[in-house]
Image (cartoon, helix red, strand yellow):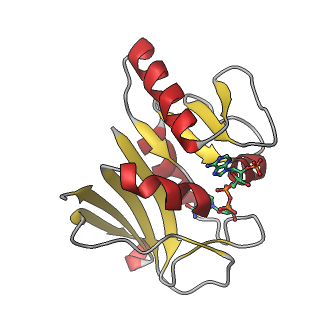
Amino acid sequence: MINIIVATAENGVIGSGGKIPWDIPEDKAYFKKITSGGIIIMGRKTFEEIGFPLPNRYNIVVSEKKNFCGENLRTAVSLDDALEIARIHAEENGNDEIFLCGGEKIYRQGMKYAQRMYITEIKGKYDGDTFFPEFDREEFRLSERICICGGKLSFCIYERCL
Ligand SMILES: NC(=O)c1ccc[n+]([C@@H]2O[C@H](COP(=O)([O-])OP(=O)(O)OC[C@H]3O[C@@H](n4cnc5c(N)ncnc54)[C@H](OP(=O)(O)O)[C@@H]3O)[C@@H](O)[C@H]2O)c1
């Protein structure tokens, strides 16, 4: 199944100057819990910001310009190529949870494929230059919302219904 996972501020900001504009341990732990054991697909800029392949996940980086490879690390030349590599890996390894992990370019191209979206909503507006795209609330239905940290964070799950 293809999932999206993202943390977004109230104004849709997800990034600023190539970085995530907050540091929230609870959200990092949630990301790790949800994606562990799965296949993660990310844009080259997001991968370079992280700086290394995330452990216990099969990492696929989308890039036309650069080639990263290593243990549990592959490069794809397009999002479609990344999804094909992910499907082959899933078939061979029996875990078909694929996560599109950003940034904005990957979310914009990948939303049409997503069956489920894990969206951490962060209270407040942030300055930034990258955004999570608007999505059609008739296409995705909210199935779960868990608020923590006194409402500062909400872990939301949206399921595709159209
Ligand atoms: N809040 C969150 O949950 C979250 C999650 C992830 C990232 N972020 C933030 O998002 C920002 C980065 O987003 P971004 O949109 O600027 O960059 P990005 O999506 O991370 O990476 C863009 C790069 O990916 C490659 N790419 C994307 N689509 C491609 C395609 N169809 N074919 C070939 N290559 C493709 C290109 O690499 P080449 O130029 O090498 O060809 C492109 O320059 C950062 O600030 C990051 O911190 C936030």
Q: Quadrant of residue 25?
A: bottom right
Please report the residue visible at 76 percent of the width from the left and 64 percent of the height from the top. 18
Please report the residue visible at 56 percent of the width from the left and 41 percent of the height from the top. 41
Where residue 104 appears, as percent x and y from the top left, is: 59, 63
Lateral position of residue 95 relative to residue 137, left or right: right
Where residue 87 appears, as percent x and y from the top left, is: 43, 26
Residue 81 visible here = yes
Q: Quadrant of residue 146?
A: bottom left
Q: Is residue 39 above or below residue 108?
A: above
Q: Nearer the viewer, residue 125 or 161?
A: 161
Q: Is residue 127 above or below residue 140?
A: below
The quadrant in which the C terminus is found is bottom left
Where residue 138 appears, as percent x and y from the top left, is: 21, 71
Q: Nearer the viewer, residue 25 or 79?
A: 79
Please report the residue visible at 39 percent of the width from the left and 47 percent of the height from the top. 3
Lateral position of residue 43 relative to residue 138, left or right: right
Ligand 1 - quadrant of the structure image: bottom right
Where residue 29 appears, as percent x and y from the top left, is: 51, 50
